[in-house]
Image (cartoon, rainbow, N blue to C red):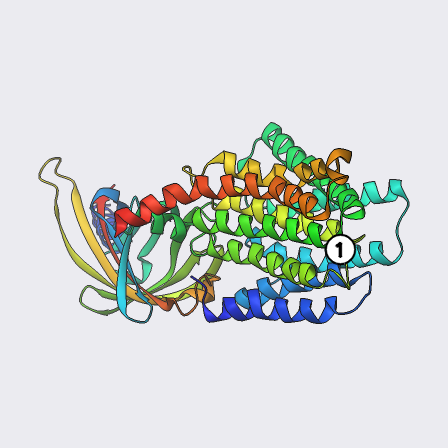
Amino acid sequence: MKAKAVVASALVVLFAGVARAETYKVDPVHSSIITSVLHFGAANLYGRFTNASGSFALHANDPSKDSIEVTVPTNTFDTANAKRDEHVKGPDFLAAKQFPTITFKSTSFTQTSTDVYDVTGDLTLHGVTKPITVKLQKTGEGKNPMNGTKVAGLETQFDINRSEFGIKGMPGGVGEKVHLIVSLEGDAK
Amino acid sequence: MLTTPDLIFAIALPLLLAAGLFAFRHKWVAPVALGVGLALSVFGTNGWPGFPPVDAIQWLGFLAIVWMIVGVIDSLRPWPTIARLAIAILVALVTVWLISANQRPNWSSSESILWIGGFTLAIFGLTISTDRLLARTTPGISALQLALLAIATAMVIAMTGSQSLANRAGTLAVVLIIAFVWSRRSQLGRGTAIVFVPLWAAILIAHWLYAASESSPLISFLLLTITPPLCWFGQIPAIQRRSRWTKWAIQLSLVIVPLAVAVILVAIPFARAIREFE
């Protein structure tokens, strides 16, 4: 009887370790999504989205089970010029009224080195969904001193060809390639 | 800013097509020049969008082709009045239904009835009114009036959020300018209004639903909309009895005044925004 209890306890501990996962809720205030695109083939113009939401799950013992899901409201795009923002959010580019969100949902995580992963997932932008693979880095983890909540950070940089997502306004004037920097901070749930 | 593809597909090709077509004295040239010109503008600059398009604005290219066919049939073999009215309301309803495809899910039932019904009736009324007007007005003046309407629409749209939709209105303007230039040979007859009005209205509605910012003045859009019916004042007998040039001046001012106000109302905040940026 005693032996059975020991085995059962060991199994519980073992499976708890295997399944140990931290799920984090994306903190919109401390997350950044920066875009840059070449203007007139000359200089990079930077913009940003705000109010990202979503969650990510990190499994310490089995990164292949990690997942991430992020939603970004399109109409938060900002380049520090109201008239240009109105144009970019209109039908020529983001079409924010037709397509109010940009989403990314992972389908696979592969750890390539310590805290670095190749993440494949579906990016939905401008009503078009395409699979993309990005290199994601876990930038760190810590504790929020105000409420003691565990926090973790992830960051990735990647390029997309905007015309592949049906964003075809001002070809030649605005670059085809859009560079994105996505940095997310999540609070453990 | 017009890019090279815009210049080629939204301006140059529709212009060459219209110049070639209006040289003929056929009844069907205006619907073909307008419909094919706009389809070239949409598909040439944006590429083939897939069917059905995800972005409701891309329906413009398909509507241009289908309404062109309707216009050509109407120009060659005019339907009885009841059939023309039924077709005009069907064309208006389909135009509104497709162009509002991305917006409809956000509307409540009553909002859907209000917006779709309102837009449909407006397009229907403007189509019938413009069709009758084209039958009564001197070809040159009617082409110029509609061209000015399309130019003002392009300017208002360009200054309130969408270069691509402005280019579509610009394409209609280019075709109508050519119609004006060739007005001694060819004319805007039957089949023109049922192509021009729904396509022009579709551009305006698409802009209103998807691009117009909260700062865009509603009065500018209303002025653009009421301009075609205002042309009817040019048919008042007292004006018709005037000399040719006086009549032209009055008929053009009926269009130029409201259109100029519509453009100025958006140009002032636009210029202010540009100045602040500089």
Q: Quadrant of residue A29?
A: top left
Q: Residue at x 56, y 57 (%)?
A: B170
On the question of residue B33 being in view, the answer is yes
Q: The disc labelled 1 sits on which kind of residue?
A: Leu
Q: Chain of mark 1?
A: B
Question: Quadrant location of the N terminus of chain B?
Answer: bottom left
Along the line of sight, the residue nearer the viewer: B88 or A91: B88
Rendering coords of residue A27 (x, y %): 24, 44
Q: Residue at x 43, y 56 (%)?
A: A93
Rendering coords of residue A9 (x, y %): 22, 48
Along the line of sight, the residue nearer the viewer: B246 or B161: B246
Q: Quadrant of residue A122?
A: bottom left
Residue with the most extreme left position: A145
What is the secondary structure assignment of the residue under circle 1? loop
The residue singled out by tag 1 in the image is B188
**Image position of A5 (left or right of A174):** left
The answer to whether residue B245 is above or below residue A161 is above
